[in-house]
């Protein structure tokens, strides 16, 4: 009997450990099966629906990889934020920025430059032809004091005025050149802005895309910007040379200019005009210098990198039984005036079927018959023996290790119905092994409480046919009961865990 008990205990332990070990091994194997296989979750942003079969995500197991793919989305307009267990993804691209140079200040300065009037020599050719002696007598006799200063000084003054007017004309011409160059730069910037705007359309297949995109390319931008830089550099050099020429002119005619208040005033205005023109030329150049062109091209490249209307996340790993993936899509900038979207999906969906093993306490109709032997002394040499029925119990209790094969209810959450099989042991003076078969209910997600109705089979102790409780025996009976296979019913209440 001890051997039978020991063997059954070993069998029960193996019954418990083997399925658990197999399940654990399977979970460990599943975690590392085919790590290069990545399940894609595909979402069509245009139609706002998932186009991949989300039921396929139910096959994902701990350790498997998955990716989110969003199609028909302009990544220059929208940002995608994924919130999983340990991931947040955000992308960003800046729109190209352009500076504009206003030349209003220069126009005001140059507009204020009015040509100087030159002296008209009233004496005409007669005075020019007169000898110096006669010219002096003529002035004295005619009392023409207004003819002072001398005719030579008048000619020099007139020459200075004429040259200053030439400088004024040159400055105004350079001002017009700068304005024309600025307009050409503005035209180039508009073309680049239109190119950039073409990337911001939600539908890159629309007619607006072709109209905005135009024929502008990197080669065109580089060629036009280089041509404009050459022109502006030439104008800057000419302004510098003209400024130097004017300074030499002022230095040479300083005496004449200092004697004439009008010339002195014009000299100051011309110096300011030369300074303003040179400063404006420098500003125009900075708008199209190498750094600025590089920033334009960089911005276009960034926008071009997102021209494919698709977002694909890095692979993410399922690190638990299930995960909730939150997807947020919104405009990169609030001024775009675009709506925001948010959704979440939970996967894998818990399986409706389950296989699990657990421990239960049972109550059964199987029971052992119990008898005692009563000895009665007749005399000093004789003793009679009789068999006494100890009123056996009508049921027994015990423990069972049950394997459940079941399915969760579609209507009642967490409720399952299952088929049950497994070994059991009675708890009594004589421990008896049992084999149980039946079915029942389970309630819970992973950890479940079970109730089972069981059909039970096992050996029970019954009175041997050799003995009769109504007879008196002269010798003590040796083995009143024998083990016989019997069948009964029972009910079990237990706990199980769904792997």
Image: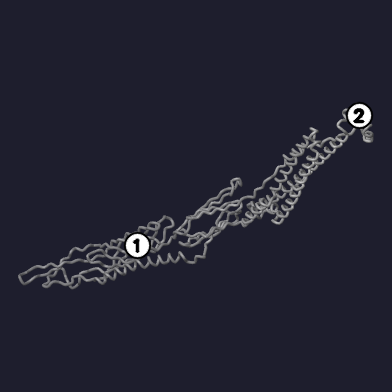
Which mark is first along the chain, 2 or 1? 2
Which element carries disc 2, helix, strand or loop? helix
Q: Is residue 187 or residue 431 the one in the foreground? A: 187
| Residue 416: quadrant of the picture | bottom left
Q: Going by the picture, which residue comes out furthest to the left?
A: 380
Q: Is residue 485 or residue 290 the one in the foreground? A: 290
Point 55% across, 50% down: residue: 341
Q: Position of residue 492 (x, y in %)?
A: 31, 61
Q: Position of residue 482 (x, y in %)?
A: 22, 71
Check disc 1 and report the residue beneath it. 358
Tally the marks.
2
Point 37% across, 60% down: residue: 497
Point out the frontmost of discs 1 and 2.
Answer: 2
Looking at the image, residue 233 sits to the left or right of residue 330; the answer is right
| Residue 110: quadrant of the picture | top right
Residue 195 in view:
no
Check disc 2 and report the residue beneath it. 139
Looking at the image, residue 498 sits to the left or right of residue 58; the answer is left
Looking at the image, residue 438 sits to the left or right of residue 370; the answer is right
């Amino acid at each position: 009997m001890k051997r039978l008990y020991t063997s059954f205990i070993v069998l029960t332990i193996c019954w418990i450990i083997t399925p658990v070990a197999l399940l654990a091994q399977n979970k460990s194997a599943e975690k590392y099966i085919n790590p290069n296989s990545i399940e894609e979750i595909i979402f069509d942003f245009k139609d706002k629906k998932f186009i991949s079969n989300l039921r396929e995500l139910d096959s994902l197991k701990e350790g498997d990889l998955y990716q989110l793919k969003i199609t028909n989305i302009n990544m220059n307009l929208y940002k995608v934020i994924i919130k999983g267990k340990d991931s947040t993804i955000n992308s960003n691209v800046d729109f190209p920025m352009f500076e504009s140079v206003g030349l209003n200040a220069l126009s005001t300065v140059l507009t204020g430059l009015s040509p100087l009037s030159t002296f008209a020599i009233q004496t005409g050719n007669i005075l020019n032809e007169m000898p110096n002696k006669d010219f002096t007598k003529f002035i004295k006799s005619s009392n023409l004091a207004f003819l002072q200063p001398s005719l030579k000084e008048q000619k020099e003054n007139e020459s200075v005025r004429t040259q200053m007017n030439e400088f004024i004309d040159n400055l105004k011409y350079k001002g017009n050149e700068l304005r024309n160059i600025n307009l050409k730069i503005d035209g180039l910037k508009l073309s680049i802005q239109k190119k950039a705007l073409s990337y911001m359309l939600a539908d890159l297949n629309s007619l607006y895309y072709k109209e905005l995109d135009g024929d502008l390319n990197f080669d065109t931008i580089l060629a036009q910007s280089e041509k404009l830089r050459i022109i502006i550099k030439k104008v800057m050099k000419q302004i510098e040379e003209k400024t130097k020429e004017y300074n030499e002119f002022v230095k040479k005619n300083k005496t004449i200019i200092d004697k004439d208040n009008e010339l002195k005033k014009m000299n100051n205005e011309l110096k300011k005009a030369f300074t303003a023109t040179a400063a404006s030329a420098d500003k125009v150049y900075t708008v199209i210098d190498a750094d600025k062109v590089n920033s334009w091209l960089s911005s276009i490249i960034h926008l071009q990198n997102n021209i494919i209307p698709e977002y694909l996340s890095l692979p993410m790993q399922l690190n638990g039984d299930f995960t909730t993936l939150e997807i947020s899509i919104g405009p990169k900038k609030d001024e775009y005036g675009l709506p925001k979207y948010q959704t979440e999906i939970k996967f894998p969906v818990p399986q409706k079927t389950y296989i699990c093993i657990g421990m239960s306490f049972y109550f059964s109709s199987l029971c052992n018959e119990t008898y005692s032997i009563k000895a009665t002394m007749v005399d000093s040499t004789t003793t009679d023996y009789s068999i006494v029925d100890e009123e056996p119990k009508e049921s027994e209790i015990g423990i069972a290790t049950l394997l459940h094969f079941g399915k969760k209810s579609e209507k009642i959450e967490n409720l399952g119905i299952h088929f049950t099989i497994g070994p059991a042991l009675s708890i009594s003076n004589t421990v008896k092994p049992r084999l149980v078969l039946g079915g029942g209910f389970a309630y819970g997600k992973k950890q479940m409480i079970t109730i089972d109705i069981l059909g039970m089979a096992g050996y029970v102790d019954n009175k041997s046919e050799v003995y009769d409780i109504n007879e008196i025996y002269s010798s003590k009976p040796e083995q009143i009961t024998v083990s016989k296979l019997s069948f009964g019913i029972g009910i079990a209440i237990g706990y199980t865990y769904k792997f």
